[in-house]
Amino acid sequence: MAELLEVTASWRGGYESLVNARGHEIPVDEPESAGGGNTGMMPTEVLCAAVASCYCLALAHVAAKRSLELPGLSVTARAERAGTELRYGRLVVEARADVPDERLAALIEPARRCCWVSNTLAGGLDLEYRYTPVEARSPE
């Protein structure tokens, strides 16, 4: 896996952006009730999608390493707002599969250890904001 990951969001007007990574695109927007056009998931839903999808793949990975199958595997991420702040204070990740409880329960922690998104959030993250100066921009 590459040491550097890059994703670009391009504004499309209103509250809509188009996110691009390795040639794959995801439209991101706000619902109409928030002034958007509802053309895609909200950014916070994309965050939850990253957690849910990465953890789902991690569960499938650790199950395969143990020669186990997880039919009907799905993972739901639920974000709970931190009071009135503009952030979420809690994220609950819940897995389901059509297997006995003890089989799925035994995979929860090993999958958490190999989930990149969960590890990134849980480990803390240096978040830095920059801009590209005009003289450094390449013509498009």
Image (cartoon, helix red, strand yellow):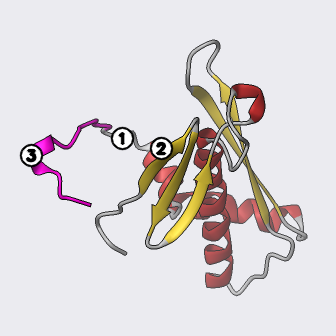
Q: CA distance from mark 1 to mark 3?
A: 30 Å
* Quadrant placement of the C terminus: bottom left
Give the CA distance from mark 1 to mark 2: 7 Å
Kind of residue at disc 1:
Leu
Tell me which secondary structure the magenta stretch mostly adopts. Answer: loop
Task: Point out the image quarter for the N terminus.
Answer: bottom left
State which region is magenta. 127-140
In the figure, is residue 108 to the left or right of 74? left
Residue nearer the viewer, 136 or 46: 136
Q: Classify residue 70 as left or right of residue 6.
A: right
Q: Amino acid at mark 2?
A: Leu
Image position, residue 19 (x, y; %) = 50, 56
| Dot 1 crowding, Cα within 10 Å, few <14, some 14–19, many 20+ | few
Circles 1 and 3, Cβ within 8 Å, touching? The answer is no
- Residue at point 66% right, 55% down? 52
Q: Earlier in the sequence, mark 3 or mark 2?
A: 2
Q: Nearer the viewer, residue 1 or 86?
A: 86
Q: Position of residue 131 (x, y in %)?
A: 23, 39
Mark 1 touching mark 2, by CB under 8 A?
yes
Query: Hey, what amino acid is under mark 3?
Result: Glu
Kind of element beneath mark 2: helix
Residue 116 appears at what percent x and percent y? 48, 59
Q: What is the number of callouts on the image?
A: 3
Residue 62 sits in quarter? bottom right
The answer to whether residue 137 is magenta is: yes
Q: Residue furthest left?
A: 135
